[in-house]
Amino acid sequence: MRTEDLINALVVDLTVSKARFRHVLFGAITLGAIIAAAVFVLGLGVRPDFGQALETARFLFKFVFALSLVATATALLSRLAIPGVSAGLWAWGWLLAPALLVVAVAAELFVMPADSWLPRLVGSNARACLTLIPLLSIAPLACILLALREGAPTSPGLAGAVAGLVASGVAATLYASHCTDDSPLFVATWYSLAIGVVVLVGYGVGSRVLRW
Amino acid sequence: MALSGAEEEWALLMRAAINGDSSAYRRLLASLTPALRAAARRNCARIGLDDGEAEDVVQEALLAIHLKRHTWDPDRPIGPWITTIARNKLIDARRRRGNRPMLPIDDLADILTAEGGDDSMDRRDLDRLVGKLGERQRDLVRSLSVEGRSIQETAKRLNMSEGAARVALHRAIKALAALYRGGVR
């Protein structure tokens, strides 16, 4: 069979209007977030003192951290999944969230006495945090990876890892409203660890299923 | 850049193709093929692969361009999109062949400005991969490619509805891309 013969078959297979990949990806992230939110509402719910917590800077900072992760990782992912689009500055954009966290930790260490650091870091929900963030990440990660199979990431493992970052960012946003540990010391330790687990899973699965 | 003329033409054809213009799509693929072939041959030669193997890269790149065409954003230049796909397929080919020296692959722009590469080659590899498809898919692909029949005629011959034939063809093309990726030799 000659290459020209192959072209014959490809031309016949030209079916009109497949959804643009970018829309597929954003749709998948939205769908994953909705499923995770539904699981969260049914299974966990927000903490009892949610209303009062909203007035404290530490509580609000958890959302700043998690949402900045979602936004920057999403921007990076949409570039990684399309051939010929360079990540540019977005390659570093996701560092915004950890950078904010470092600032928050420094502030916490500055304002709080040294003997309160350890209890604040250990908190009382470490195990829940390490379990629930990965669990809440499952639906978003699955949706995003399925969408990425429609894309064409040149580095499947990397794209999978960044998908994990987006998914765990979504999960962390939800979990943050349930968790009563608000210290940046707790967030820096346990949230980061939980996110790291999801990123590793994303890398492992991505490098297997995202080749094209 | 020297490639902007061809690139604009390709972008124009691809936009028409995305809107369902199959004659534009045919012209696009026919015009891309020699450019891909010339680049694939030059790069393959440097890493010790022959022209036949370069043709495999061309076919794989065409399959990927076809299956991933919705990832191209019509507001962006098409050149980097095509060259990244082609480069990826070259890297795959090199990886499949085992321990080749990791020579750099030519600059992306070179791929599109390359001259020559007009002579096609008969590839038994593609035939072998088509042979690995199920019987029905195989007949379908052969009828539409080598035998050059229309989809209506093919569907009738195989006793399928046209819609079913289209679905089966799309599956077959995806399966071919997967077989290539699996490095079936």
Image (cartoon, helix red, strand yellow):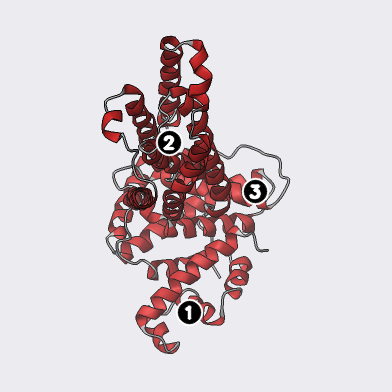
**Crowd band around label 2 with a 10 angstrom C-alpha radius: few (<14), some (14–19), many (20+):** few
Quadrant occupied by the C terminus of chain B: bottom right
Q: CA distance from mark 1 to mark 2?
A: 39 Å
Q: Residue at x 51, y 45 (%)?
A: A160
Q: Secondary structure at mark 1?
A: helix
In which image quadrant can residue A65 be found? top left
Q: Which residue is mark 2?
A: A86
Confirm whether circles 3 and 2 share one chain: no
Q: Residue A76, percent across and down?
A: 41, 37
**Mark 3 touches mark 1? (CB < 8 Å):** no
In which image quadrant can residue B19 be found? bottom left
Q: Is residue B79 above or below residue B19?
A: above
Q: CA distance from mark 3 to mark 2?
A: 23 Å
Q: Residue at x 31, y 60 (%)?
A: B17
Q: Secondary structure at mark 2?
A: loop
| Observer able to see residue B115 | no
Q: Residue at x 37, y 63 (%)?
A: B26
Q: Residue A19, percent across and down?
A: 31, 57
Quadrant occupied by the N terminus of chain B: top left
Q: Amino acid at mark 3?
A: Arg
Front one among A193 and A88: A193
Front one among A157 and A140: A140
**Crowd band around label 1 with a 10 angstrom C-alpha radius: few (<14), some (14–19), many (20+):** many
Q: Amino acid at mark 2?
A: Ser
Q: Which residue is mark 1?
A: B140
Question: On the picture, is A75 further left or further right than B176?
Answer: left
Q: Which residue is mark 3?
A: B94
Confirm whether circles 1 and 2 share one chain: no
**Crowd band around label 3 with a 10 angstrom C-alpha radius: few (<14), some (14–19), many (20+):** many
Q: Tally the marks.
A: 3
